[in-house]
């Protein structure tokens, strides 16, 4: 990335503090949307960006996927590796930002972005960069809070999510970030979350399942 990254020590410290609690911040069970959609795909190689404590990566490994994951939080990785050991599966889980991790272009059959709320200044740039690591006909699985979610937070802070609208998503933004995809699912939905300590109650999310048809013209 040409500009200084907004992923700084304060951002890293925030997530290390959250994941240092012995309880799993978002539970040990996989996200319901990820679980439903992943089982529809042929097993292959999958990348989990911003994977935190590993609940989704561990589930994918249990289904036979070859799993790679990354995050900036050492505490998150520590919990993920404990969860993998508990469930007797293997993960390749690295610490760092995407462009430092040595992934090969066009090497994954799927990429799962589950509540991967990167800093607003780089989130679209990261989506476009991640696209280059996905094979043609590979699949993006995406669930994250929509821009409408702020209204739900005002009613119930326990539902979680970023508090600045720039870090939240819209259908239009997903279309712009992934223009080279066949859209299988792209919708804004109100859902009931019950995930660990920090995702509880009604919220608004964007759900996207897309199949890569060509290389992106906007890398």
Image: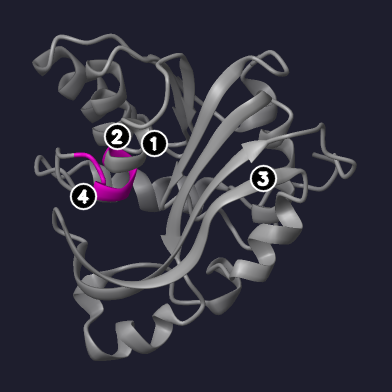
Quadrant location of the N terminus? top right
Cα separation between marks 4 and 1:
11 Å
Name the residue tied to disc 4. Answer: 26
Name the residue tied to disc 3. Answer: 182
- On the picture, is 130 further left or further right than 11? right
- The picture quadrant where one finds residue 182 is top right
Name the residue tied to disc 1. Answer: 51
Which marked residue is nearer to the observer: mark 2 or mark 3? Answer: 3
Residues tagged 2 and 3 counted as in contact (Cβ below 8 A): no
Q: Percent x, y for residue 56?
A: 29, 34
Residue name at image x 22 percent, y 17 percent = 62
Q: Percent x, y for residue 112?
A: 46, 37
Name the residue tied to disc 2. Answer: 56
Q: Percent x, y for residue 64?
A: 30, 12
**Visible residue check, residue 126:** yes
- Residue at disc 1, secondary structure: loop
- Residue at disc 4, secondary structure: loop
> Which sits earlier in the primary sequence, circle 2 or circle 3?
2
Mark 2 Cα shell of 10 Å, populated few (<14), some (14-19), many (≥20):
many
């Amino acid at each position: 990335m040409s500009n200084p990254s907004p992923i700084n020590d304060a951002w890293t410290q925030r997530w290390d503090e959250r994941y240092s609690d012995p309880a799993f911040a978002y539970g040990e069970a996989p996200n319901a949307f990820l679980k439903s959609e992943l089982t529809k795909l042929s097993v292959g190689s999958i990348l989990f960006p911003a994977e935190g404590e590993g609940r989704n990566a561990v589930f994918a490994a249990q289904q036979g996927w070859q799993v790679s994951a990354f995050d900036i939080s050492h505490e998150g990785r520590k919990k993920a590796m404990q969860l993998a050991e508990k469930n007797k599966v293997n993960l390749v889980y690295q610490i760092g930002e995407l462009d430092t991790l040595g992934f090969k272009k066009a090497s994954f059959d799927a990429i799962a972005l589950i509540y991967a709320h990167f800093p607003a200044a780089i989130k679209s740039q990261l989506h476009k960069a991640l696209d280059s690591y996905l094979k043609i006909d590979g699949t993006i699985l995406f669930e994250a809070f929509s821009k409408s979610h702020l209204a739900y937070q005002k009613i119930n802070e326990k539902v979680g999510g970023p508090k600045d609208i720039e870090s939240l998503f819209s259908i239009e933004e997903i279309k712009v970030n992934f223009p080279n995809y066949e859209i299988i699912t792209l919708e804004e939905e109100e859902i009931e979350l019950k995930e660990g300590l920090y995702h509880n109650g009604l919220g608004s999310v964007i759900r996207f399942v897309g199949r890569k048809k060509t290389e992106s013209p906007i890398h």
